[in-house]
Image (cartoon, helix red, strand yellow):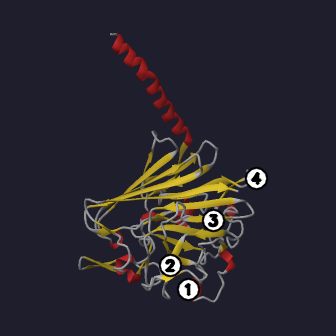
Amino acid sequence: MKKILFLSLTLVPVMFASCNQSTKNNEMVKKDVFGTRNGKEVYLLTLTNKSGNVIRLTNYGAKINWIEVPDKNGKKDNVTFGYDTFDETVNGDMSFGSVVGRYANRIAGGKFTLDGTVYNTPVNNGPNTLHGGPQGWHSVVWNTEILKESKFPAVKFTYVSPDMEEGFPGKVNASITYTWTDNNEIVMDYTCSTDKRTIVNVTNHAYFNLHGAGNGDILDHVLTLKAAAFTPVDSVMIPTGEIRPVAGTPFDFNTPHAIGERINEKYDQLILGRGYDHNYILDKKEKVNVTVYEPESGRILEVITDQPGMQLYTGNFLTGSQIGHGGKAFKFRSGLCLESGHYPDSPNHPDFPTTILNPGETFKSTTIYRFSVK
């Protein structure tokens, strides 16, 4: 009897601690109805870490909608593109903060061959398929789960992509878990599995401006990107197959450079992309793959990933027509994207790292956005 009593007494604090953690996590994640889409509820989820810093997510496109972090003086501002209402989100830019798939980036001519079968995907970027097509994962309502046992506020989104959705073979079970740590890190854990041989390439398409979203351009942001080479593109932004060293070119960010320092040089790849819109082949020798520093605010963004590539995009096609949070317009080069993933058009380039996913395998990947100041 004494042993049973002792066991009961030891279990009480453990159960109480577990209960406290669940209660704490419920307080750290607030879930509000954002709208409805195709008969499904869409939520806006607010995650708050112990420093009181906030990110907002929505299960429509598994998007990051808001990232509020302090500058060097403690003044907080949102540093990512998004919209105040669900209608604006649906009718706005498809990519802002989205998880894009089934194949992130471009597929040449809207077609690829797998095991002797030609698959056609919808063309939505000149002659190419971009980010999984017009009805890709950015445009669907994901299932939502608040992870109550997580040490930090965390939300898991899941989606079942049916066989031949947007022309891609296989039923794919996809998930993305966002964790907002007390070190101001957005940890993004992706998993995918399939019942049929297919291709998978997923990323997050957040735009960043460390001045604050909608506050000027990103040309003064100082970039360090640890990559010895990149994949040049043709006139429709498809890789030519060349692996070009960055040394001696405006694409070398191995030592820090302001983004605007060389962006307007008469260099073939800058002319084609109207700036930077290219995949870098990451060295994978460093703990941090990319660092962005904005001197005025002192904000720093670091990106850490296990993926082989990083697409740098400098908002070259933003026109100011998209009006985001607080009525701010997103103008030419007012945001930059750092999209971790595989190379563009890999299914049509056998020499590139493969993006094939087989039944019985699980694709797993982690990318982290870490914010700090100096």
**What residue type is disc 2 on?**
Phe
Q: Earlier in the sequence, mark 3 or mark 4?
A: 4
- In this figure, which residue is indicated by the disc labeled 1? 269
User: Looking at this view, is 307 or 360 the one in front?
Assistant: 307
- Eyeballing the image, is 51 above or below 36? above
Q: Earlier in the sequence, mark 1 or mark 2?
A: 2
The structure residue drawn at horizontal position 38% and vertical position 77%, both measured from the top left corner, is: 352
**What residue type is disc 4 on?**
Asn
- In this figure, which residue is indicated by the disc labeled 4? 73
- In this figure, which residue is indicated by the disc labeled 3? 292
- In this figure, which residue is indicated by the disc labeled 2? 230
Q: Position of residue 370 (x, y in %)?
A: 58, 56
Which mark identifies residue 86?
Answer: none
Residue 164 visible, this angle: no
Per the image, label 2 sits on a secondary structure element best described as strand
Crowd class of label 4 (few under 14; some 14 to 19; many from 20; radius 10 Å): few
**What residue type is disc 1 on?**
Gln
Between the residue at mark 2 and the residue at mark 3, the CA separation in whole angstroms equals 19 Å
Q: Position of residue 266 (x, y in %)?
A: 63, 89
Callout 4 touching callout 2 (CB < 8 Å):
no
